[in-house]
Amino acid sequence: GRETGIALAANPGIDGLFFTGSSRTGNALHQQFAGQPDKILALEMGGNNPLFVS
């Protein structure tokens, strides 16, 4: 959910985040990542294209 994604994004040990979900949560993550050009943020909001990592 939203809280989990925001907590994960706040972890200083990550280099970036790939997110598929609601526009509300995606916008919150976008605001949180603002000003951090060294971190990757990829958002898929409201589409039908999930990302599977194995």
Image: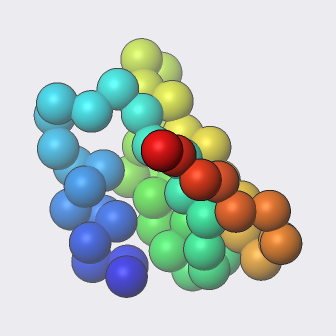
Looking at the figure, which quarter contains the N terminus?
A: bottom left
Q: Residue furthest top?
A: 38
Specify the quadrant of the image occupied by residue 13.
top left
Q: Nearer the viewer, residue 49 or 2?
A: 49
- Which residue is nearer to you in this view: 9 or 28? 9
Indicate left or right for 32 with 51 as reference. Answer: left
Give x and y (percent) for residue 19.
55, 57
Instruction: Give coordinates of residue 18: x percent, y percent.
Output: 54, 47
In the rendered view, does 38 fall on the left or right side of 12? right
Q: Residue furthest front?
A: 54
Look at the image and name its color scheme: rainbow
Q: Is residue 44 above or below residue 21?
A: above
Residue 37 appears in the rendering: yes
* Residue depicted at 34% across the width and 65% down the height: 5
Kindly identify the residue that appears in the image at 62 percent across and 43 percent down: 42
Residue positioned 51% across, 30% down in the render: 40
Residue 28 relative to residue 14: left or right = right
42 up-or-down from 49: above or below: above
Give coordinates of residue 7: x percent, y percent. 21, 62
Please name whichever residue, 37 or 54, is drawn nearer the observer in this view of the structure. 54
Q: Residue furthest left?
A: 12
- Name the residue rendered at 45%, 58% in the picture: 29
Number of on-image labels: 0
Compared with 51, 4 (above or below) is below
Query: Splitting the image into 4 quarters, where does residue 6 fall?
Result: bottom left
Farthest-out residue, right? 48
Rendered position, 2 above or below 17: below
Tell me residue 28's x, y (percent): 46, 67
